[in-house]
Image (cartoon, rainbow, N blue to C red):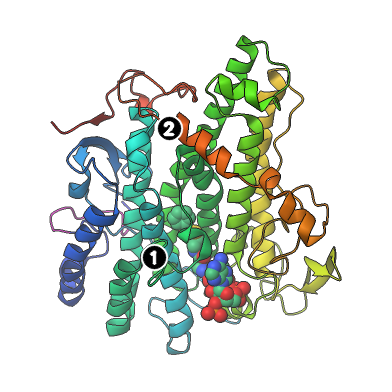
């Protein structure tokens, strides 16, 4: 078995980082643990804390060992600290230290920058759990309820992952940051979460699926960039987190697919040929495609803001220092220094969107965002395939990257989802055609009626093609507390 794959399950905190041999760290983490459980009970999933949920728990980090399924009460979930196996002789792949051995400790000059990256990453994890805390009450099935909780416990574990790095490598500063990660709350006016999208509401299951499709995918891109880090413990942590992240995006991708499928079936059965005949489609109790498009417009634009400014000296410095690479840096064929390279960047100039070459080092956020958008396109193409196969001409689209932005070159630019540039007043007047309106919200909310009978699904969503862990269709994924 490669070094670091063996997980110690005996103590309070399952881990493969040798916690038993590091008493000071163990004590620090055990001191943090009760606050985490308080946070989970107070700000994690509302209700269901005494229910038995069919969850997977990582019991090893090798491909066979990391997904073991069983019934567990969520507060008893074994949140552990798990790093992907060390790569023997790993060397730094980019930036000024390229070719040097990867670091096992944090170089003094990069402490502040690295700490900031870890704190921002860590802050998003509990934030998403807080955003999703009321969704259990309206789950469309026990299968979906279980998937929600799986995502939630793993986001909780991802918080542990960052807290481990902060406490092990950043001393007292790290302990203070770990406390603050439990202090901030999504949407709290006095102590909000750090990034914009993580203070937005996730009011319904359509939002949840779009969040896991779009926003968790930002998580994937950012973790993939951090997995390239010269700081080896961060790289190993992120590599293991990425294995869990894949399921979260599966939940979003297939969730939207199932919503679309159900809408198509209902429209066909009712003889509706025009998917934009919203009144008739809504009378069937399914999600009309124009509303889905507006919800997509919202979640996509909120998530693009998470990539920061298109041109960023923070990103350039992090790259040169070796802290954060590009997506699949190790598969890119160039000098991995980027001192002379340029990259095409979309800018907002005199009321028009124009592409201009910029220094590639400054344009790393833009490049990661481009990689992200390309991945999103694939998902949307899959949904459109189902729509076309059902004989409808309607197409879901990703809105223009300048639409509805608050961060970066396009912040406040009056660009329509199709890329048309409008007068600011005209944009405002059409807001409800671009983004979910109050009426859309009320309609979606009216669909959110819980279904808790094994094997049954709310009428607005199709059943999944297969069960979790190959369980049969009527499997009771969540056993409610008496
Ligand atoms: N909201 O130089 P810039 C996930 C700030 S999601 C508020 O362009 P940089 C997950 C920025 O902090 C992935 N503020 O920024 C998904 C900076 O502030 P300071 C989370 C923002 O550093 C679902 C200033 O504006 N991980 O894992 O190049 C469920 C100047 O900006 C925002 C990471 O993001 C915003 N949207 O890029 C659960 C990775 N954007 O320093 C989990 C770690 C920017 O001047 N973070 N600002 O005070 C990073 O790599 C970078 O911090 C960012 C920003 C990409 C976020």
Per the image, the residue denoted by label 2 is 448
Whether residue 5 sits left or right of residue 460 in the image: it is left
Chain part drawn in magenta:
3-12
Seen from the viewer's position, the closer of residues 37 and 30 is 37
Image quadrant containing the C terminus: top left
Cβ atoms at labels 1 and 2 below 8 Å apart: no
**Is the distance from the Cβ of mark 2 to the nearest ligand 1 atom less than 8 Å?**
no
Q: Residue at x 40, y 61 (%)?
A: 186
Numbered disc 1: secondary structure: loop
Q: Residue at x 55, y 55 (%)?
A: 218
Any magenta on residue 4?
Answer: yes
Any magenta on residue 152?
Answer: no
- Residue, far bottom: 109
Q: Residue at x 21, y 69 (%)?
A: 32
Q: Residue at x 50, y 43 (%)?
A: 207
Give the x, y percent position of residue 69.
Answer: 27, 36
The image quadrant of residue 265 is: top right
Numbered disc 2: secondary structure: loop
Per the image, the residue denoted by label 1 is 188
Whether residue 446 sits left or right of residue 65 in the image: it is right
Whether residue 85 appears in this view of the structure is: no
Quadrant of the displayed image that contains ligand 1? bottom right
């Amino acid at each position: 078995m490669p070094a670091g794959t063996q997980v110690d399950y005996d103590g309070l905190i399952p881990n493969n980082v040798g916690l038993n041999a590091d008493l000071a760290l163990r004590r620090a983490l055990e001191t943090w643990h009760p606050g985490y459980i308080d946070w989970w009970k107070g700000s994690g999933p509302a209700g269901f804390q005494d229910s038995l949920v069919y969850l997977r728990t990582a019991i090893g980090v090798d491909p066979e060992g990391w997904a073991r399924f069983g019934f567990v009460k969520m507060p008893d979930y074994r949140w552990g600290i798990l790093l992907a196996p060390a790569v023997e002789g790993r060397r730094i792949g980019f930036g000024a230290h390229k070719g040097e051995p990867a670091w096992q400790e944090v170089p003094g000059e990069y402490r502040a920058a690295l700490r900031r990256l870890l704190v921002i990453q860590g802050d998003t994890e509990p934030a998403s759990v807080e955003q999703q805390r009321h969704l259990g009450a309206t789950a469309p099935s026990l299968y979906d309820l279980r998937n929600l909780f799986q995502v939630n416990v793993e986001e909780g574990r991802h918080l542990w992952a960052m807290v481990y790095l902060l406490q092990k490598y950043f001393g007292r500063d790290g302990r203070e940051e770990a406390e603050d990660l439990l202090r901030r709350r999504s949407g709290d006016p006095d102590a909000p979460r750090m990034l914009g999208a993580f203070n937005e509401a996730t009011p319904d299951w359509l939002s949840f699926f779009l969040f896991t499709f779009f926003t968790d995918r930002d998580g994937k891109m950012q973790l993939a960039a951090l997995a390239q880090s010269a700081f080896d413990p961060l790289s190993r942590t992120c590599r293991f987190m990425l294995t869990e992240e894949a399921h979260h995006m599966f939940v979003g991708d297939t969730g939207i697919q199932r919503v679309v499928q159900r809408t198509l079936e209902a429209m066909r059965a009712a003889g509706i040929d025009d998917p934009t005949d919203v009144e008739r489609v809504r009378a069937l109790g399914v999600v009309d495609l124009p509303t889905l498009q507006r919800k997509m417009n919202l979640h996509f634009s909120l998530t693009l803001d998470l990539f920061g400014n298109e041109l960023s000296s923070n990103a350039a410095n992090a790259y040169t220092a070796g802290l954060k690479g590009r997506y699949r840096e190790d598969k890119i064929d160039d000098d991995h220094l980027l001192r002379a390279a340029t990259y095409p960047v979309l800018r907002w100039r005199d009321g028009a969107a124009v592409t201009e070459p910029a220094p590639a080092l400054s344009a790393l956020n833009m490049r990661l965002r481009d990689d992200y958008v390309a991945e999103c396109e694939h998902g949307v193409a899959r949904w459109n395939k189902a729509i076309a196969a059902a004989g409808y001409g309607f197409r879901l689209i990703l809105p223009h990257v300048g639409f509805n932005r608050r961060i970066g070159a396009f912040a406040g630019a009056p660009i329509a989802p199709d890329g048309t540039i409008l007068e600011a007043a005209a944009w405002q007047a059409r807001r409800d055609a671009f983004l979910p309106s109050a009426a859309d919200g009320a309609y979606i909310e009216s669909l959110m009626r819980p279904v808790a009978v094994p094997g049954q699904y709310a009428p607005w969503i199709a059943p999944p093609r297969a069960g979790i862990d190959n369980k049969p269709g009527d499997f009771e994924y969540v056993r409610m507390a008496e």
